[in-house]
Image (cartoon, helix red, strand yellow):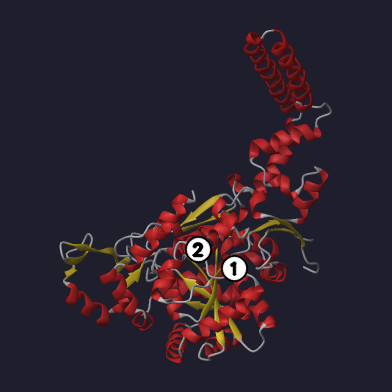
Amino acid sequence: MSKQPTKDFLSYSDTGYFSEFICRYIGQDPDLNELYHRFPTLENFEAQINEKGKSFDGKSRAVLAQVIAQQYSKLKTSASTANNIEALKKDNTFTVTTGHQLNLFTGPLYFLYKIVSTINLTKTLKARFPDYNFVPVFWMASEDHDFEEINYFNFKGKKIQWNSNQKGAVGPFDTSGLNQVFDIVSAEFGSGKNAEQLKSWFKEAYLGHETLADATRFLANELFGTHGLVVVDANDKALKQQFVPYLEKELFDQIGFNTVSETNALLEKMGLKIQVNPRDINLFYIRKGLRERIVLDDGRYTVVNTDISWNKEELRQELNEHPELFSPNVIIRPLYQEVILPNLCYIGGGGEMIYWLQLKSNFSTQKVPFPILLPRNSVLIKSHKQTEKLKKLDISNSDLFLKRNTFINKRVRKISNIDIDFSKQIKYLEQQFKDLYKLAEQTDKSFLGAVKAQEVKQIKGLQKLEKRLLKAQKRKLKDQIERSTDLQEQLFPNQGLQERSLNFSELYLEYGHDLVPVLLNSLEPLKLEFTVLEMPL
């Protein structure tokens, strides 16, 4: 691809696809100030670097680098990634982190946008603060257990799914059975250079690695390893050993429940939707095929749906001897991340940002620096062909984000050769009735009710006529409307954002090796606006 895409930007609130909560955060609503530490501006990173540097010691760095190096030991690692892993040992190295579930073949397209945002931010920080190193980190959600959320990806409207009866944390799931899925994707991807590359990645990832975590690390490394991405699987004994003091507080003092409950009460008063609710104990107990909650019941700590239980001292011993068997839930997982990483910023989607904003009080109580929270880049990619069709139909980028009925109605009004907007007539009618109200007040006020009834009746009549005329024009302009809605459906599958449905493979088939470089050259993580990319020929 010789040319770079044309970029356009929309505010998140104007798209209509993002929650009030996240729009208020991006807009720096002062009512939300106490929910975060520092807003994601380039200037604020200097203070974040200083604060994190004082709280993170050399021993933690050594353990982190050693664990990651071991996890990469069987993987072909780029010089950039190898240098970043080694750099983690140094006091002047910090991370920018994103994370995601272990979706089959990366899952939705925003998997790429999360990582690109992270890599690009590290480049921006290096340019501004050249005396420091900044490492892009992808945190694998290897301890999640909701297999139904991750066992598929969408390809050209089809759901390609991996069926398995395995239970427990998904990272250790063995990849048996994925040879059958490979047969399906091979047929779906078709032929050609780009298709063969996709097949090769799928085969090497899932048929060449024994666990889902290893397969996901391989894929992320293939796509982004040359750009220095470091993948972390935190389901590790040495890493969890460092988190034991915080796990003890969670088990025996219930700090997570108390602090987050207070924040949630505040959010409810503000009328904001809560993303997650804390439990008394926000930990799971995990073994092969098992991931169940730990609860305190009648003085004993038990693992639900099992016969496993301990008294307080037995549990403390189990925790210290086998920390790898204890798994944080969504409330405690962010704290774990910030304890074991020299991290400055977390990059995530809107839902992730909201639950992070619920957690600052827990960090403050635990005396762990709260990271800067940055919404990932959100992107709509239009092909050159789609762009040309949209221009011919005179459809703007902002038009595309309209809900389907509003989009159709606007199109009908725009391309109709008659005026279907009765707002002028309604406004004129309202003015006429204002004069009638004055006349009724001067003569007999008992007529005011009758005048009002007539006003309502006549305005309703005009609105009804407008709807009938609009409906008639829709029939008359059916072909043009169908072309418009077909284009919108291509770009907004099932009337949702492209990035939440499409898999990267659809775009890779068209753009091949240019896809990732184009994204890296185009996305601006600190811009905080929705990006529309119009791809060139």
Residue 351: % across, % down? 51, 57
Which residue of the protein is positioned furthest toward the front in this rendering? 442
Residue drawn at x 56%, y 84% as measured from the top left: 50
Label at residue 326:
none
At label 1, which amino acid type do we have? Phe
Alpha carbon of mark 2 to alpha carbon of mark 1: how far?
Answer: 10 Å
Secondary structure category for the residue under label 1 = loop
Q: Is there any visible trace of residue 85 in the rendered image?
A: yes
| x 58%, y 61%: residue | 110
- Residue 301, compared with residue 81, is above or below; it is above
Task: Tally the numbered discs.
Answer: 2
- In the image shown, does 125 or 163 lie closer to the viewer? 125
Tell me: 102 left or right of 13: left
Residue 94: quarter of image:
bottom right
Q: Which circle marks residue 35 in the picture?
A: 2
Residue occupied by mark 1: 39
